[in-house]
Image (spheres, helix red, strand yellow):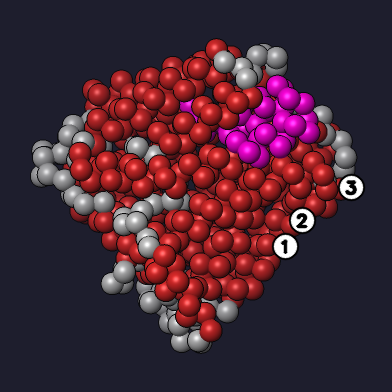
Amino acid sequence: MAKRTGDRWLYSTFPISVATGPLGTMVQLFLIQLNGQALGTIYGGLAAAIYNGISIPAALFWGVTIDRLHKRKGLITLSYALIAVALVSFYFDRSTQGTIARYSIISFVSLASASPLNLLIMETEQKSRWAGAFAKLSLVSSLGNVVGLLLSTFWTDLLPTQLVLLFVPMGALSVTSSALSVVMIREPEFVLERETVARRRPSFFARLLANPVFFVTIPSLSDFRRAFRGIRSSLTRSVPLFYISSILFYLSSGLFNTSFVPVMHYYSIPDQEVFGVVLASSIVQTAAFQVAGRLVGNRNLVKTSVQGLLLRGWSYFGIGVSALLFTGPMFLGPALLLYPVSSGLAYAIYYTSANTMMFTTVQGKSAGAALGVFSAVAGIAAMSGSFASGFISVYDGYYVTFILSGVLLFISAVIVGRLPKPLSPDEGVLQ
């Protein structure tokens, strides 16, 4: 093992987190500025759908690259540098097609650093320090997102007509992370296989938090058939039910999140307040993840997952009803109250409990196949939800999109509730 020089290199991820934290909101608002409310909403849905869809082949490509090159520092530095180029280029090409293309490129290149960061921790830290290092990585990333949203809020308050200019300092922050990676990261003296990330709970959680699409092996058609064919038997239906509930969760998330920023713009809420709502959610989520592990650790995983889904579902439903009743700036009140609950508190509860269940699934004989099937269905569901979101919102109303998102979560909660109850959190429910 390489001589331990501390985990100070983790701070190199802070500037890139500041730069990418508000990116989705920036792109959606920019597309609305370019195309108007209706077309901007549809194009925003298309951008989000392509962003989610690109993550699937990107995870496969960078996974193979990582396994062959074993260059952690190089891939991390390259990822941050390419993100910087893409961010700065937003300012110079202000077309809709160019915006969507660059957003997709960022989706592709950002995954080049996701797994190497996890592996680097495991290759440079003692096992006893892994959990702490992963927790620190997540905290630094979350705090960076918060700072990025705070910066965006002030920027749009002081320069409300210069949103596109914000991409330039965000690009500079990405360059900073790339430079810090060169200086602070040392290539490990020995390397681990990517599969080890899925074998350790802290690394597994950190990796899925960065992006829920993660492949150890490429799943085959027979893997998908095997994953769902046991649904008819009470003895083997746990895994397919879990997959179906996950599909509904990511479909709901794609539907809701893609239209949430546009609806606030539609109701004449200023951009700085839009960023403020997203900022409040990010702060709540960061705080919730600090206690979610302890909260979920001693409780029934199935019950906790259901509670997280119901809390998120009722929040979505409440936002949908509010979008129907408060068709103006008054919508800011329920948005500021319910969005942090759904995307902050409820998400942290569900994420921790559901991924604990998922962790038990990928410890079996077909770990790579199980994780691959989960990643594929999650990515496709998120992509489908994002694609449909813009059209539903424009032609049927934003409130329909949000209420439908809540209903999907209620159905997901019913399905999760049918999973067998484990004797203990460590036993899991999907073994």
Residue mark closest to the camera, 3 vs 2: 2
Q: What residue type is labelled 3?
A: Leu
Circle 2 SS class: helix
Query: In this figure, which residue is indicated by the disc labeled 3?
Result: 325
Circle 3 SS class: helix
| x 28%, y 33%: residue | 75
Give the main secondary structure, helix, strand or loop, of the magenta stretch: helix
Query: Where residue 407 is drawn, which disc sits there?
Result: 1
Badges 1 and 2: C-beta atoms under 8 Å apart? yes
Query: In this figure, which residue is indicated by the disc labeled 2?
Result: 403
Give the vertical position of 195 relative to 427 (above or below).
Answer: above
| x 76%, y 47%: residue | 392
The answer to whether residue 56 is seen in the rendering is yes
Which is nearer the N-term, disc 3 or disc 2? Answer: 3
Residue 23 among magenta residues: yes
Gap between marks 3 and 1, in whole Å? 19 Å
Q: For residue 393, what is the image quadrant?
A: top right
Q: What residue type is labelled 2?
A: Ile
Which is nearer the N-term, disc 3 or disc 1? Answer: 3
Give the vertical position of 116 relative to 377 (above or below).
Answer: above
- The picture places residue 112, in percent across and down from the top left corner, at 35, 37
Give the vertical position of 121 relative to 246 (above or below).
Answer: above
How many C-alpha atoms fall within 10 Å of the one at disc 2: few (<14), some, or many (≥20)?
many
Q: Is 40 positioned to the left or the right of 65 in the image?
A: right
The answer to whether residue 173 is seen in the rendering is no
Residue 36 among magenta residues: yes
Q: What stretch is highlighted in magenta?
A: 19-47
